[in-house]
Amino acid sequence: MAAVLVGQFHARDAEGRVYSVHEFQESTPSPDGLTGMEPVTTYKLAIGDRVEKLDGLEFKLVQSGVILTREVELPVAQ
């Protein structure tokens, strides 16, 4: 099972440091084994540290417990 990069975004910690977060999607067999593969989304920093999605725009660095908030991208006026 290979993970496929499906997105990338920036998040900030409480001190204002910016982190580049990569979003991956991988398929895993369904629990019943009958309905095929179910997509699972995982997150990692660009440097490889694992990131856990909490809820909404909040994430947590697994190793250190630092809470990150995803930056909201504003649409560009044309």
Image: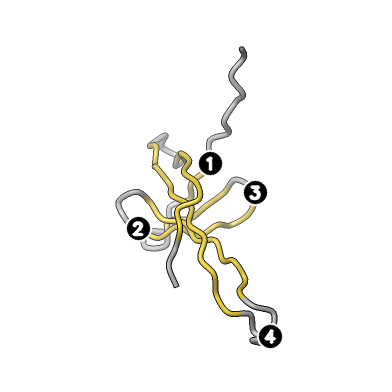
Which one is closest to the eye, mark 4 or mark 3?
A: 4
| Numbered badge on residue 17 | none
Q: Which residue is mark 4?
A: 34
Please count the marks in the image: 4
Of the image marks 1 and 4, the number of the one nearer the N terminus: 4
| Numbered badge on residue 56 | 3
Q: Tell me the amino acid under the disc marked 1.
A: Arg
Q: Image check: 10 left or right of 46?
A: right
Of the image marks 1 and 2, the number of the one nearer the N terminus: 2
Question: In the image, what residue occupies the spot 62% across and 14% down?
Answer: 77
Which one is closest to the eye, mark 4 or mark 2?
A: 4
Q: Secondary structure at mark 2?
A: loop
In 3D space, how far apart are the residues under numbered discs 4 and 2 (Cα atoms)? 33 Å
Which one is closest to the eye, mark 1 or mark 4?
A: 4
Q: Which residue is mark 1?
A: 70
Q: Which residue is mark 2?
A: 49
Question: In the depicted view, which residue is nearer to us: 60 or 77?
Answer: 77
Q: Compared with residue 72, is residue 38 higher up or lower down, i.e. above or below?
A: below
